[in-house]
Image (spheres, grey):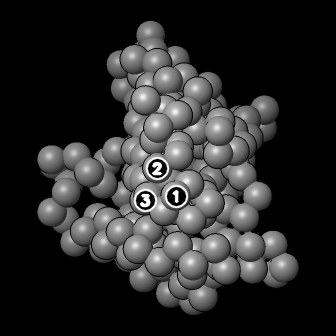
Amino acid sequence: FSSRLERWVRKGGKLLVIADHTDLYDSAQNLNSFLAKFGYQIGTDAVYDRSGMPNVPATPISMSILGRIDADGSPLPWQTGSSFASLPLGVLPLASYGPSFSEEGDYSRENRFGPFFPRPSLRFGEHTAVAATTIGKGAMVVVLDSTPWSNFSLFKDVYTKLFRGVIHTLSLPDNLRFAGWGGLGL
């Protein structure tokens, strides 16, 4: 199945991949075996803000110049996303968690899969939450938190805008190709 799906994307198909909750039920491991063909790898970690809470970045409107679909200045709440362990060349970051920590997921904990205690030993930075790239004639978008597509948030305005941005990006693979590879020149 994964080989057929890969061929379909390379021939012009559009694929939206939504990951969730670090590696809950081995979801990252299962996705990574497929995503590796395209240069993506999802970490088995969880991201959170400076205080140990879920991320709620507000990306400035000016970032839309760089292709950010979350750039409207509104707070965008993320809940239990993970980070990318690797991204392919020419990828375009569409949205981020904002400045955040990344720590290994711990499923012995009930709440959000980690102690979420900020400390210098953890990776801190701007973690990409949504990334897009062209694959042959097709395109792929990978989202690292299912919150925007959960039934409790699907119809909230901020998530509806994000979803429209993802679909719009997938519908314009030539623009995505230029923006992604153009970003390397910047």
Question: At 70% from the left edge and 49% from the top edge, which residue is drawn?
Answer: 87
Q: Secondary structure at mark 3?
A: strand
Where's the N terminus, which quadrant? top left
Where's the C terminus, which quadrant? bottom right
Whether residue 54 is situated above or below residue 112 in the rendered picture: below
Residue 94 position, x and y percent, is: 53, 67
Query: Would you identify the image quadrant in which residue 18 lies?
Result: top left
Q: Which mark is residue 58?
A: none
Question: Horizontal placement of 27 versus 115: left or right?
Answer: left
Under mark 1, the amino acid is Lys
Under mark 3, the amino acid is Lys
Question: Horizontal placement of 110 versus 138: left or right?
Answer: left
How far is the residue under mark 2 from the one under mark 1? 5 Å
Query: Would you identify the image quadrant in which residue 177 lies?
Result: bottom right
Question: At 44% from the left edge and 10% from the top edge, which residue is drawn?
Answer: 108
Residue that lies at the very extreme toward the right in this rendered image: 185
Residue 101 position, x and y percent, is: 63, 43
**Residue hosting label 2:** 8
Question: At 53% from the left edge and 43% from the top edge, which residue is drawn?
Answer: 6
Residue 160 position, x and y percent, is: 25, 68
Tag 2 near tag 1, CB within 8 Å: yes
Give the mark toward the camera: 3 or 2. Answer: 2
**Residue hosting label 3:** 14
Question: Horizontal placement of 79 versus 10: left or right?
Answer: left
Give the mark toward the camera: 1 or 3. Answer: 1
Q: Which mark is residue 11?
A: 1
Under mark 2, the amino acid is Trp
Q: Secondary structure at mark 2?
A: helix
Question: At 16% from the left edge and 48% from the top edge, which residue is drawn?
Answer: 152
Q: As rendered, which of 102 and 155 lies closer to the eye?
A: 155
First in residue order: circle 3 vs circle 2: 2
Q: Is residue 17 visible?
A: yes
